[in-house]
Image (cartoon, rainbow, N blue to C red):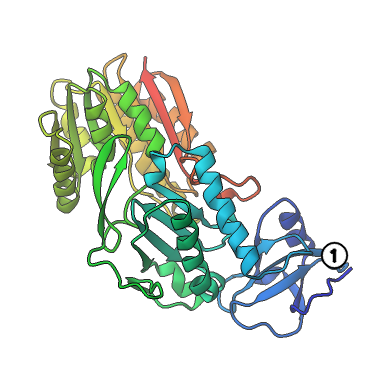
Amino acid sequence: MKTIRSYPLYTVTPKAESAIVRGHPWVYDAEILHTEGEAANGALVDVVSKKGRYLGTGFFSQQSKIRVRLISRNANDRFDAAFWDRKLRWAWEYRKSVMSAEDLDACRIIFGEADAFPGLTVDKFHDLLSVQVLSVGMERIKSALLPALVRILREDGQTIRGVFERNDAALREKEGLAQYKAWFPLEGEAPPASPITEITENGIKYLVDVENGQKTGFFLDQKYNRRAVGRLARGKVVLDCFTHTGSFALNAALGGAARVTAVDISESAVEMARANAERNGLSQVMDCVTANVFDLLPQLAKEPPQYDFIILDPPAFTKSRKTVANAITGYKEINYRAMQLLPRGGYLATCSCSHFATEEKFTAMLQDAARDAGVQLRQIEARQQSCDHPILWGVEETSYLKFYLFQVV
């Protein structure tokens, strides 16, 4: 039975119908059998099965291979201001339920499809919101969404002094959208004088630059994994590889590590890590070194053992299925080297932030690395991204971070 609303109708294949019924919100261009009515780019369309069964309503994109991104599977929904207000409040209330008030100082408020805001990311960094819009549908309604979110947060006692758009991602071009960075105009308010704010995470203070920092300004998804590393680091000599802003190293130092060496190939990242150590009074136990981890680990193997806890938090080695094999080779190299460096009884924290390096592939790689290094791994914890980056079952793209704590035995 077709819906009685006036949206254009998009009839999809049985394969697409099956995916939607399982919870996936995307319809690809090749899955559309035929259409009724004309849809403007970024406008709403209804999706139906071959038999006319209503499957959902979503935003149409003329250029993307993801032709429709669903926002609802309820045929009775009215997509007015009240609908979006309710969804924004639901997303914020979820964060308030699963995180402490302290952890809300820096958190992800909107995580795209996992919150049914396809292509939208909103991160809260103390008193600034950092926003990334990657779909034409969200671009079309952001002028209503973002002021509504600011109002909701302020009504709840949150101080928000500005909203910065980090729309400098190449993915926007697949939706026919230009790349740019700019303050989002809030009616009657001048933009903040500075894009820099200070956040507190796990008791550690960081300066976050929402204009020039990585992605939206700071990686929030490892919040609780950093805390787990801090608990394990007491009394240990720690090597933090791919340190970036020094976050894992800082948590280890604050947790009582005897000594921490933070390593990154980027001199600017090392300078930032060093500044963060000074800001938190941890410089006396934390060294910051500029080096290529792939060169450093083999070099350390030639020296007397120094470390009893190694942390591997590399950038995503792959962002597509085509390069997964090369990525797994890279992951194996650093994990194999780390396992060789650690003494029996030493500890290893290792992770991958690539969705395409699946859990199955990543754990198989770890088993291969351990076998080649001649060690056995005793698992302490298997963790994922923090709860403000919720994993929506049926949408595999929302599950991307793999994090393991091991003892080498």
- 156 versus 73 height, above or below: above
Q: Nearer the viewer, residue 8 or 380?
A: 8
Q: Which of 189 and 193 is in front in this view?
A: 189
**Residue 193 falls in which quadrant of the image?**
bottom left
Percent coordinates x, y for residue 28 in the rendering:
65, 67
- Identify the residue shown where x is 26% and y is 62%: 195
Disc 1 residue type?
Arg
On the rendered structure, is 254 left or right of 107?
left
Looking at the rendering, in which quadrant would you find the C terminus?
Answer: top left
Q: Which residue position holds label 1?
A: 53
Give the farthest residue toward the left: 284
Q: Is residue 318 visible?
A: yes
Percent coordinates x, y for residue 198 in the rendering:
25, 49
Looking at the rendering, in which quadrant would you find the N terminus?
Answer: bottom right
Q: Is residue 243 visible?
A: no
Percent coordinates x, y for residue 41 in the rendering:
59, 81
- Identify the residue shown where x is 37% and y is 55%: 159
Q: What element carries label 1?
A: loop
On the rendered structure, is 396 left or right of 143?
right
On the rendered structure, is 220 left or right of 267?
right
**Residue 229 falls in which quadrant of the image?**
top left
**Residue 181 falls in which quadrant of the image?**
bottom left
- 153 versus 371 height, above or below: below
- 102 versus 216 height, above or below: above
Q: How many labels does the image show?
A: 1
On the rendered structure, is 355 left or right of 57?
left
- 226 versus 70 height, above or below: above
Label 1: few (<14), some (14–19) or many (≥20) C-alpha neighbours in 10 Å: some
Q: Nearer the viewer, residue 361 or 114?
A: 114
Percent coordinates x, y for residue 54 in the rendering:
81, 65
